[in-house]
Image: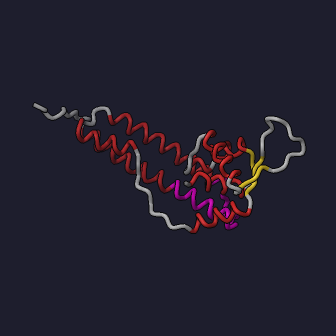
Amino acid sequence: MSLPHAILTALLEKPSSGLELTRRFDKSIGYFWSATHQQIYRELGRLEESGLIRALPSEQPVRGQRKEYEVLAAGSAELARWVAESQDPKPIRDPLLLRVRAAGVVGARALGPELRRHLELHRRQLAQYEAIDERDFPPDRDAEEDRLRRLVLHGGLGLETFWLRWLEEAVAEVDRLGGEERGAPDGG
């Protein structure tokens, strides 16, 4: 349900073509709400059919020309309604957590390298978020929109910091266990 709202948000920030939207997703919104290019284009069609967005008129209609979209009043109203809606937190569904749990049954022999790989990936992501924070949010940038965008970025910084601490703990624990392998229980 949130992809259409992510697209409405992006289009309200700046009317864009589908290609521009996919690029913006890759560089900003995609850090916390990912979508494939196909999903974005499919959702643009649905939003247009629903009367929430429209393709801006083109001076020279040409077959295959990219459309630029803008949000209509109904789209703004839908986004405002969604922002005010109550929603419970979603449970974490991360395959790595399940793999650690499974290692308790089959052993942690192969888990160490994967945990270290994830640790490095989260270090890189944290460094990227810190660079975005420094580049895009200097102290004098204090508009409401900037403050809210920075708040989202700080959520990402906090999550990456959590993952780094947890992964460091997990690597140390797996190392202490020596990567034990457990056999399947005898089935008879």
On the image, which quarter does residue 136 sit in?
A: bottom right
- Up-down relation of residue 149 to residue 166 (above or below): below
The quarter of the picture where the N terminus appears is bottom right
Residue 112: x percent and y percent?
A: 34, 36
Residue 125: x percent and y percent?
A: 53, 45
- Extreme residue toward the left, this view: 188
- Which sits in the foreground, 12 or 156? 12
- Which sits in the foreground, 182 or 43? 43
Q: Residue at x 26, y 35 (%)?
A: 179
Q: Is residue 15 visible?
A: no
Q: Residue at x 63, y 40 (%)?
A: 37
On the image, which quarter does residue 10 sit in?
A: bottom right
Residue 81: x percent and y percent?
A: 61, 66
Q: Residue at x 57, y 58 (%)?
A: 152
- Please check the rendered image and state whether residue 86 is part of the magenta-colored stretch, yes or no: no
Report the magenta residues as a range.
Answer: 134-157
- Which sits in the foreground, 134 or 33? 33
- Up-down relation of residue 143 to residue 42 (above or below): below
Q: Is 152 left, or right, of 175 in this rendering?
A: right
